Image: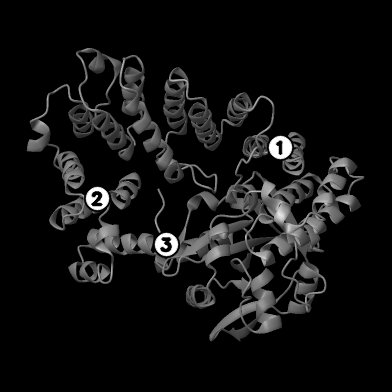
Amino acid sequence: MKLSIEMHRTLALINAALLKGDDQTLEKAFEGVDLTELLSQHTIAVVRGLAKDPLVMLLCTLAEHNDVEVSDAKRWLAAYQSIARRELQPVLQSLSDRHVRRLAVQALIVRQPIDAKILAVGKVKGSPQDWQEALELLIDHKDWSSSLALLRHLGQQRVETEVWVRIARCLSSRHPLYVETSGLPQVDVDYKALASLYALCADAAGQAKVADVQRALKHLSASALETAGEHEEAALMLDRTDPQQRSVAVQLDVARCFCKQGNLPESIKRLDRALELLADNQLDQEKVELKPSQETRPGERESIKTFDLNKANKALSDLSEMANAKGTPVFLVSGTLLGCIREGQLLSHDKDIDVGIVGWENQYTLCMALQESGLFTVSAQHLKGQDTFYIPICHNATGMWIDIFVYHPQGQHWVTGVDFFFGYRQTFAFTPFELKEVEFLGVNMKIPAEAELNLTENYGEWRTPDPGYLSHLESPSTMNKGALPYMLTARLSAISALSGMSATSADQQGKSRQKLGKVLTLMQQYQHCPHGMSQRLIDRLSGLLQVPSSADEVFHA
């Protein structure tokens, strides 16, 4: 259930105007919008999943009046109006009191969960579509208890296979709404209940002897358990779906579960197994997508494809103006500082915007100012007190992501870091610096007074452009090179490179080969360290660098 960035922005504008009762802004928000897309059931389903009830009712009303999937819009509008008004609408009153949709709506009206006793009173009626929509409605309103009771009851009945097919598809399509690529849990999602819903569907698929569907549903169940923090249980479930350890995707997910448990050696072992599978051509045409949670930070994967210099300039300018006005200045760091000093602009091949603050105490003042400005969105989940090393924020007007790195004074250095959503942290040490003001992008911004020293510590020879630079592995500032976090990053970088070697673009293939070559050179250098990469695997992967591009079809991004 994905929407374009533009559609998300449109919905955000409409929702804000709706909640404020600003009719003029609301009317303006609809200008130039494709109503067929905006009022489609797909878009409405996403809005329902995001629990924006007033917006759901508005879109359903407009869909009905504009002849866009009218029958579906009417059903959802009746359900949502009944819940909002705490009274069954006529179309629902006409249904049997044992109809599954009516039962779901009534439970939400009176706020009394459906349980086994209620379901045992008499036969629950409804078509496969009714069962699906009843479950959707309960999940929309985060009534996880009723959802589980309903599905468990269904599992005890002899029903059409179509019911389970519809429910399984519905849950699968909603997965990205609840299990984010960041790996962070949402406060109103019961992930254990969600995992149980997937498991019940998997059991039904098993009874229908559809092994591939059963396996996929168990994988989703494990994903929900992982998000719930049940890493050991998730890893066990994943291993049961891949007993021979032949699936790259499963091995990556198991590795992430071990990493989040703090068992980094076992995580590295599983990543090496994934690399062996890729290298030995044992994928059986399996497609592997390296998730943002496996290598990158939230929004970064999207930014790689959509980085727009004009939008990035606007986002950075708004941040600097807001921070200066609030007395909470930020300063340019990393690639953004490099662009400023070397080229006088943001790097065209960059992936995001990087700024810094000093001292973990300042995170609260800055983030409060960000929220009050209305220009940025920041999640409180990233505010971890003394354990905060970076905070990703989103610029609302452009959708651009900005990483705020928190520098911690430690001894004679300022230490910052990256919390990878794979489940570990890498840290980087810099010489402390004063700040100076420069004009950049037409705005007064702060940078380290000794900017060239800072860039040398970060990049080494920074004056010569190197788009293939592996900052987390090659940077002189990287702490504890050869330690477990470093070895994890190297494996993930190698997997990312192998995935990129299947790109249709010859340029991308070349960059991926260069990246893999760099990783293997470093792995040879640090082979003597605990959990270094075996010579056999280094040699096998090195051999792939000699394979012509046309033979790279074994790798699937």
Q: Quadrant of residue 233?
A: top right
Q: Nearer the viewer, mark 3 or mark 2?
A: 3
Q: Are marks 2 and 1 in contact (CB under 8 Å)?
A: no
Name the colouring of the figure: one colour
> Would you name the residue on which mark 2 appears?
56
Sequence-wise first label, 2 or 1: 2
Q: Is residue 412 left or right of residue 434?
A: right
Q: CA distance from mark 3 to mark 2?
A: 19 Å
Q: Residues within 10 Å of mark 3 (few under 14, many from 20)?
A: few
Three-letter amino acid code at the position of disc 3: Ile
Three-letter amino acid code at the position of disc 1: Gln
At mark 1, the secondary structure is loop
The answer to whether residue 272 is above or below residue 394 is: above
Rendered image: mark on residue 282: 1
Q: CA distance from mark 2 to mark 1?
A: 46 Å
Three-letter amino acid code at the position of disc 2: Val
Counting from the top left corner in percent of width and height, residue 495 is at 71, 49
Q: Quadrant of residue 103?
A: top left
Q: Residue at x 48, y 73 (%)?
A: 326
Q: Residues within 10 Å of mark 2 (few under 14, many from 20)?
A: many
Sequence-wise first label, 3 or 1: 3
Of 343 and 74, nearer the camera is 74
> Would you name the residue on which mark 3 appears?
5
Q: Residue at x 28, y 49 (%)?
A: 41
